[in-house]
Image (cartoon, rainbow, N blue to C red):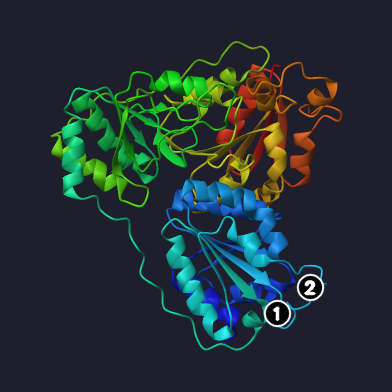
Amino acid sequence: MNGAETLVHTLADSGIEICFGNPGTSEMHFVAALDREPRMRGVLCLFEAVAAGAADGYARMAAKPAATLLHLGPGFANAISFLHNARKAGQGIVNIVGDHARSHSRYAQAPLTSDIMAICGGVSDWLHQSRSPAEVAGDGARAVQAALRGRIATLVLPADCAWEAADAPAPPLPAILPGAVAPDRIEKIAAALKNGKRTLLLMRGRCLERAGMEAAGRIAHATGLRIAHDYFTPRITRGAGLPAIERIPYFSEQIVEALAGLEQIVLVGAPPPVTFFAYPDKPSWVTPEGCELLTLATPEEDSIQALTALAQALGAHAPGSLVPLVRPDIPANGALTSEAMGAIIARLMPQDVIWSDDSLTAGPGLQKFLVNAPAHDAIYLTGGAIGDAKPMAVGAALAAPGRKVIAVSGDGAAMYSLPSLWTMAREKLDVVTIICANRSYNILNIELGRVGAINPGPKTLSMLDLHNPELDFVKMAQGMGVEASRAETVEQFAAQFADAMQRKGPRLIEAVLQP
């Protein structure tokens, strides 16, 4: 047994069931070892960022980490953007990064020699380089233990540590579970919710799944407080039959307006809200002056346990009002808008889909109707590195087979991760990808004025424009084996989306939006 085999068996013994990889020469022994471990599935991705985004989506829906297999420092660098998103989302990933053999790493002139630990360090919460074949399996077990805590764990594996003989797999290490919130803190928050102050319960993390949402709904009904989640929340179960919840807005002035008048904010697995960017003459810190910040549960604590205990302490047993199911009428035919798309999707989508979303300017129109759609899970862009809706959809589909996945992205963002379509086709994933095509980086057109860059000239505007040449997502998708069509009217989109909901397998709809 070589080092790679001990590592693969250790990962499988520790509960890792899937590896999203873009391997190279240094990882060939790991790839070969996958053949001899039936409990682990290897999924080929044509770009490292797709592997990272897929591992993120898998972790969000499976509630456990996946592995990635990446090729030296430059390969890891290609994955950094979506590993950044996963880290911001608190999703554990085990990165196995092949490196030069120890005897070869001395040659700085070798093309792929790099400061690999520095490259990996920027987005890794746990980082280690194996020093010998005998240590590889134990290093892998420690990496999984870190990832099970929601950490980005990166193990750099020199090629000779993979190919040389090693003893045996290492036993799994115990998972470090989220800590329970102490009774005295529960009592403190319960007392604060009885003081009559205008209160918001700000939630993030696993408490936004059904059990936590239902507990929060009982608390809101008993106390009259508002419940909300941040704009870029990792995952939320929402829709008909669940408590209504606000989404903190995107733009700074909208956040300030939404939070105005609050006297206390109770944080449940969430940090205090701040704006996405800094803007001239606008605040980054948006908590109202004089508003007290109280913590019910930190991100490292069991937020569902905390909410359940708080509901019990308050005697909050009644579920309160739940979101009604609203199936909007199909809008009248005409030019396609994001709001019309949202109505059509809410009308036709089935129960229990997974909604993967990194849309920005199209987002408000889409979301308007989805809050009353059949219950579903939504996973969002978290770290601001756009383009991850499609890769996350790959991971989500593999984590939850049997559930239809809808991925929504803008045309600019979609180009960041186009190879994910190929993986959808190869794996025959039931993912419907919707490209909101406005032929521009429209969010930047909006931000141009907001940051004070006035009177933009033609060179500036051309940097934000996606014409000349115009992107053709239908041809690109078809070239990677995904059935695709273009919708330019309400009627066309309704027909194409209805068809996509009735059939399994990967499908892309390029929705050309009215300017």
Depth order, front residue of 189/413? 189
Question: How many discs mark residues in the rendered view?
Answer: 2
At horizontal 71% and vertical 16% (from top left) the residue drawn is 515
Amino acid beneath label 2: Ala
N-terminal of the pair, mark 1 or mark 2, is 1
Q: Which residue is mark 2?
A: 108
Q: CA distance from mark 1 to mark 2?
A: 13 Å
Q: Is residue 427 visible?
A: no
In the depicted structure, whether residue 442 falls above or below residue 150: above
Q: Is residue 135 left or right of residue 442?
A: left
Amino acid beneath label 1: Ala
* Quadrant location, the N terminus: bottom right
In the depicted structure, whether residue 424 falls above or below residue 261: below
At horizontal 56% and vertical 87% (from top left) the residue drawn is 166
Q: Position of residue 93 (x, y in %)?
A: 52, 58
Numbered label attached to residue 439: none
Q: Which residue is mark 1?
A: 101
